[in-house]
Image: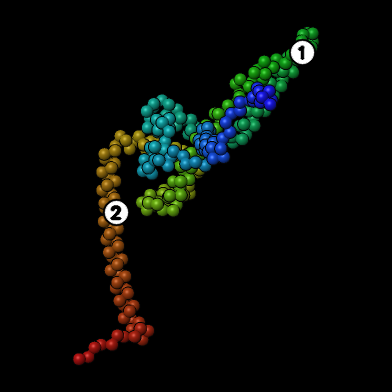
Amino acid sequence: MDQDNTVLDYLKVDHPAQKSFAEHQSTVTENAAGNLTEDAHPARRERSSTDSTKSGHDNKTSTDYHSYMTPRLKSLVLWENPSKSGAVLGGSLALVLSCRWVSLLNVACAALVFGISGSFIYVNGVLLFNRITSKPAVRPLEKYYSRSAEFLHVESDTIHSRVDKLTDGLNVLLTELAKIVLVEDNQRSAIFIALSYTVWTLRTWFSTTTLLSLILIFFFAAPRLYLDNQTLIDSQVAKTSELAQQHVGKGRQLVQEKWTTVYSKAETFAKEKGLIKKSDKKTE
């Protein structure tokens, strides 16, 4: 019997202590909480053009119009570099005015016709000359189009960045347009009504290309002229606004007086015709 116990003691294997059911549940809960914490903070993803998150323009005030302009555009319209601003204005005017006599579609098609035709004649002429002189038939322009990916390749990151900027700009325009149409500010909406009517009227006097040229000139000239004469312009605008408010106040008072007079006459006429019962007078 002692031998059997000795054998059994020899065969014992040290097993790790078994956890209780409560300890096991606690371990499972801690592991699950750890997984939820990791899932709650996923790796940050690069911004995509399809994202519907609020763009940075929501933090800008609606009165800070210069905040919507990129530094490059602001530099152009304020003529910080006169030669560059003049070149951009001149090129834009030339492009707009050229559309009056030349169709851009015709120009593009003509460029493709002459360009492809010239390449076709050159390539096949060189191939024919190589056959006559028993030289290797190698296309002469192969070294250029085989490396075209190095020069004409468009990076997807660049496209995404440009699309994001375009989307932000469109969101700004749509938001501001909604504020104007839905009359967030009476004065601002009234200004745009006047501007729209002015453009509408000028369109009946001038052609579209002439009107676009005038708008371009105004877009480049107005900011610079305003900055150079800001004190004078602000004082004149303040005087004009004050005068307009005085006239509006007088007109409102006159309308109220006229309305009171017309209403009293209409009430008297209705009482005389019996349309409205006269109020009984108190007798002592």
Q: Between 198 and 253, which is closer to the camera in this rendering? A: 253
Q: Residue at x 36, y 51 (%)?
A: 187
Question: Residue 284, how many percent across, how many down?
Answer: 20, 91
Gap between marks 1 and 2 measured at Cα:
83 Å
Amino acid beneath label 1 = Ala
Amino acid beneath label 2 = Ala
Q: Residue at x 50, y 43 (%)?
A: 208
Instruction: Kindly give the residue lying farthest to the left in the view shown.
Output: 284
Residue 229 in sight from this viewpoint: yes
Label 1: few (<14), some or many (≥20) within 10 Å?
Answer: few
**What residue sits right under mark 2 in the picture?**
244
- Figure check: 268 above or below 46: below
Q: Between 165 and 126, which is closer to the camera in this rendering? A: 165
The secondary structure type at the circle numbered 1 is loop
Q: Residue at x 47, y 41 (%)?
A: 54
Q: How is the image coloured?
A: rainbow
Question: Residue 191, how many percent across, how many down?
Answer: 38, 49
Left or right: where does residue 225 sit relative to residue 152?
Answer: left
Residue 29 in sight from this viewpoint: no
Q: Check residue 137 in the rendering and tell me which mark sits there, or answer none.
A: 1
